[in-house]
Amino acid sequence: MSAAPPTPRRFASLKNALRAFRYRNYRLYFGGQGISLTGSWMQQVAMGWLVYRLTGSAFHLGLVAFTAQVPVIFMAPLAGVLADHWDRMRIMLMAQALAMAQALVLAALMFSGAIAAWHLLPLAFFLGVANALDAPARHSFIVQVVENKEDLGNAIALNSAMFNGARLVGPPLAGILVALAGEGICFLINGISYLAVIFALLAMRFPARAARRKITAFWPQLREGFTYTFGLRPVRLIIALIAWISLVGVSYVTLMPVFVRRVLNGGPHDLGFLMGAAGCGALLGALALAGRQSRQGLGAIMVSGSLLFSAALVCLAQARGFWLAMLLMFCGGLGMMVQMASANTTVQHLISDDKRARVMSIYTMAFMGATPIGSFLVGILASALGVRWTITIGGALSLLGTLIFARSFLPLSRAAE
């Protein structure tokens, strides 16, 4: 007897989960970013291992991470004003070209044998400038490639799935390549991967749009963005949570090379697979969110994800075996992605389009800007207290911040539903 064909309900469920793919521009965006992000994850793992190999210092790991991300604190709000008035696609193309140049310079230094520890700080800062320019434009650009705002939440969840699919593939591949051929090959692959997103952006087609108004008064526009953002209480609370978790929790990633080497007695391939496990958990969380048809209950989901991430971090610090650490990294990645994607979707639905890039630049500053400060601090703490205590403290503070946020935000979320 032949197997029964899939029910129409299954097809409907799958079609709903992938509904943003009906837009050609979104398909191009998704494919280009997916390839490029795989290369970016490879570079991140290779860079962390290179820093630790050259310096043997947890402090230097934190310092390089700080240098790579600190430009976001100063540049993201300014880039947000530009992205609300200039062509966002052109800003993204410029940023991708700058990031590609940084990766290729790193690869050239590695293959020539000229690489030295002092090279890493200016190159990390240069990449941070490119990312600070790119992030506000990219976060607000998603509205242009998804024509129906009702599909925005689905597109954001699929973006998160793509980000973490790359995270699932990139780090393990980087770990294997670093062990076999050194870090330089990862930098070269990342540099080439930027071509995918550049070609995807150039292939997009948009209907004629009204010309964006010129920036007649830059600083008043910047001030207006801050006033608008922090005048919306739900947005203000979400940004505060994102900043806190990024400061005390997400910065644990900086210490993973030390954790793998000193605690688990592992090598670069172990680091790659642990980071891949976090990506696998995050991918699962993103796909689960992509299948949702309603924004109802997102506030509770956001809090649940943050609690899971925080608890996994505390437990990870106590792990002594590789497989337990893999499981906890999976849970941490799942929790973090559920929290981040829910927060992004909620904020995007609450704001107006003419201020979108400025709001998302502040959101980016909260996420990417707090992380370098956290990375710098965990580098100092790990040198003084050890990697286990540092990760434990970060997880506990993350948990405390989540509970305070939940007390203020959940009543607002339920009332809005």
Image: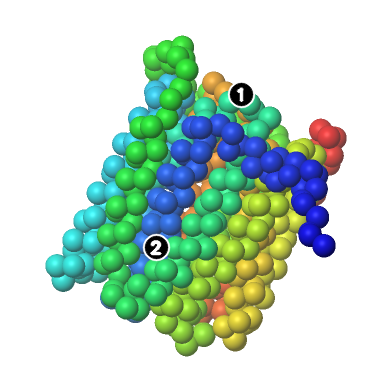
Dividing the picture into quadrants, the one containing residue 314 is bottom right
Which residue is under mark 2?
42
User: Image quarter for residue 215?
Assistant: top left
Report whether residue 377 is seen: no
Q: Residue at x 68, y 30 (%)?
A: 150
Image quadrant holding the N terminus, namely: bottom right
Relative side of 386 to 90, left or right: right
Residue 136's x, y, as percent? 47, 36
Q: Nearer the viewer, residue 214 or 1?
A: 1
Q: Is residue 221 above or below residue 260?
A: above
Q: What residue type is labelled 1?
A: Ser
Write the residue at 46% across / 84% down. 266
> The residue under label 2 is which amino acid type?
Met
**Residue 106 image offset from top left, x and y in percent:** 24, 60
Percent coordinates x, y for residue 186 in the rendering: 32, 64
In the displayed structure, would residue 226 be above or below residue 166? above
In the structure shown, which secondary structural element does the residue marked by tag 1 occupy? loop
Mark 1 surroundings within 10 Å by alpha-carbon count, few (fewer than 14), some (14 through 19), many (20 or more): few
Q: In this view, does 316 lie above or below 247?
A: below
Q: Residue 352 carries which label?
A: 1
Residues 253 and 397: in front is 253
Disc on res. 50: none
Quote the CA–CA distance across marks 2 and 1: 36 Å
Give the residue furthest to the front: 1
Q: Are the residues at dot 2 and dot 1 in contact (C-beta closer than 8 Å)?
A: no
Report crowding for label 2: few under 14, some 14 to 19, many 20 or more residues within 10 A (C-alpha).
many
State the residue in front, 338 or 167. 167
Residue at disc 2, secondary structure: helix
